[in-house]
Image (cartoon, rainbow, N blue to C red):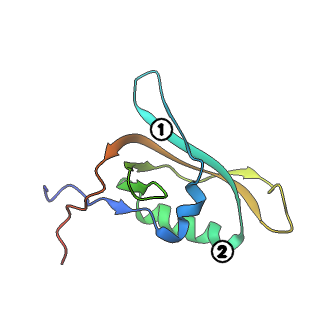
Amino acid sequence: MPLTQNPIVEWPTEFQHLLAGIQVAAGEDGKRYGHIDIDIDPETLFLLNDFEARVRHRQVRIRSADSARCLIGEMNALVGLGAAAQPAKHATRVRISFHDLLDDDCVDRSPHM
């Protein structure tokens, strides 16, 4: 791996449920993207914003629920979509999205130190 290339970052397992039902599509240019709109609580919003800031301009590996399939792509900034559908349970509605999605073999090739 070239020194200028950042290692792939795993999507946190504690956030795995947030991507259940993510919609993946291809744009006119053939590049794939994915997004999901979800209601979340304030703590999860904070943690997602923190994660997004740490992985900016790096590839993120997204595993399927059974870990048999993976995609890699760059995470976009979270987009606030307004009030949650159930305000008693959640604080807000956000869109989690990724661009330039590629199929991945789920193998971590980064050197471990």
Q: What residue type is labelled 1?
A: Tyr
Residue at mark 1 to residue at mark 2: CA–CA distance: 26 Å
Where is residue 67 drawn, in percent x and y? 40, 59
Q: Identify whether 85 is placed above or below 45.
A: above
Where is residue 23 drawn, in percent x and y? 56, 40
> Crowding near pointer 2: few (<14 within 10 Å), some, many (20+)?
few
Residue 82 falls left or right of residue 57: right
Q: Residue furthest left?
A: 2
**Is residue 78 or residue 110 the one in the foreground?**
110
Residue at 30% in and 59% down: 8
Secondary-structure class at tag 2 = helix
Q: Identify whether 79 is placed above or below 11.
A: above
- Label 2: which residue? 43
Secondary-structure class at tag 1 = strand
The mark total stands at: 2
Q: Quadrant of residue 60?
A: bottom left
Residue 29 falls left or right of residue 45: left
Residue at 40% in and 31% down: 31
Where is residue 84 drawn, in percent x and y? 79, 57
Residue at 45% in and 58% down: 66
Mark nearer the N terminus (1 vs 2): 1
Residue at 40% in and 25% down: 30
> Crowding near pointer 1: few (<14 within 10 Å), some, many (20+)?
some
Where is residue 54 drawn, in percent x and y? 42, 66
- Label 1: which residue? 33
Q: Which residue lies furthest to the top in this view?
A: 28
**Is residue 13 or residue 41 the one in the foreground?**
13
Q: Which amino acid does label 2 sit on?
A: Glu
Q: Residue furthest bottom?
A: 113
Residue 4 falls left or right of residue 61: left
Q: Which mark is residue 95?
A: none
Q: Quadrant of the C terminus?
A: bottom left
